[in-house]
Amino acid sequence: MVRFSQGRPLAARLLTGLAALLPAAAHAAREWNFQPAATDIARQQIDLHSFIMWICVVIFIGVFGVMFYSIFRHRKSVGHRAAQFHENTMVEVVWTVVPFLILLFMMYPATKTILAFKDTSSPDMTVKVTGYQWKWSYDYLQDGFGFYSNLKTPLAQIENREPKGENYLLEVDNPLVVPVDTKVRLLITANDVIHAFWVPAFGIKQDAIPGFVRDNWFRAEKVGTYRGQCAELCGKEHGFMPIVVEVVSKADYAKWAAAQKQKVAAAGGDPAKTWSLKELVAKGGEVYAANCAACHQATGKGVAPAFPPLDGSKIVTGPKADQIAILLEGKANTAMTAFKQLSDADLAAVITYTRNAWGNATAEALQPAEIKAARK
């Protein structure tokens, strides 16, 4: 009794010391399940997970219940001896057929969910997502603008010189903005190494692979801010490339998109301006890195056979009209999509860059006015 009464304050002191050593654990969120679903696909995934889990629980209880019952009831100490039998047809049929039926029972909802989240057809809008070390870029292909999204958490917080913010390492300067109740198709790729675009509340996680374009989609049901992260170990700052998606009303999205287009128009300057070869090559290098390098590589060597090399290409070094047509219209039955969403200045710059980069030395400059004239 005395030992017990002395142990109580000792236990309390031990618990207090442990809490002091683990302040992060003391204040950590105690959620143990998935994030609340913000899309129908995420809800289906959660329901499927729960359904399969309960099947596993029933199997676990059944198998181990029979096993422990058999061990207890047929133990040697009460006189039982192990039965000797081999090649029991009924037993073999049962342990083959029953698991097969269970798998069929699980297969239908799983297949239904997989087909649903792989169906990227008939989107209302398309956004190209590119992963970089260590940031994301978003290109709104139907609206003709794009931007980079960088970590916004102050360095002082990362280095523990300031208190951590509410959204520590999960805040960016330019979030992905989409309208509510809109099917958004994502074309996902990477510029350097493998990344992964993951937003748990939307039920989407897709690897971003250099030289490949993968797609995914979501339809957000509620206005709000949703956060995710790169889910593939991509380098020393892997933990510093968060994803933030702002879901807004359709009216607010229209206003936001109009403002972004105005920024693009302002940045393009005078469309009648004549650019020098040096200016075009400098600007074209930036446009190429943001839009073309993921497939054709920074060296211009491409990734055969899907993405042919631009270094020494007959299209790049041949008539300018042919290269303009491919960038504006794409090429049927290939991975080359149209880039008409880029401004006249951007297209003129990137074409000039490719015609004067690597081993290409045409010394030709293409002006934005030529792109404008070629648009249909």
Image: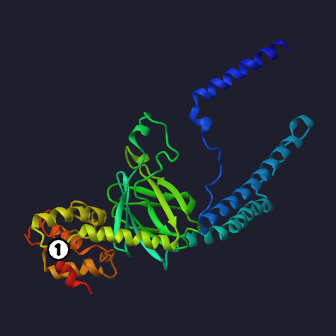
Q: Residue at x 22, y 64 (%)?
A: 301
Residue 224 is at least partly visible in this image: yes
Q: Percent position (x, y) of residue 289? A: 26, 61
Specify the farthest residue to the bottom.
376
Label 1 SS: helix
Front one among 150 and 230: 150
Q: Is residue 109 left or right of residue 139?
A: right
Quadrant of the rendering where the C terminus is positioned: bottom left
Q: Residue at x 58, y 31 (%)?
A: 22
Residue of label 1 = 316
Residue type at numbered disc 1 = Val
Q: Residue at x 14, y 74 (%)?
A: 366
Residue 183 is at least partly visible in this image: no
Q: Percent position (x, y) of residue 76? A: 87, 37
Q: Quadrant of residue 277?
A: bottom left
Q: Residues within 10 Å of mark 1 (few under 14, many from 20)?
A: many
Q: Quadrant of residue 127?
A: bottom left
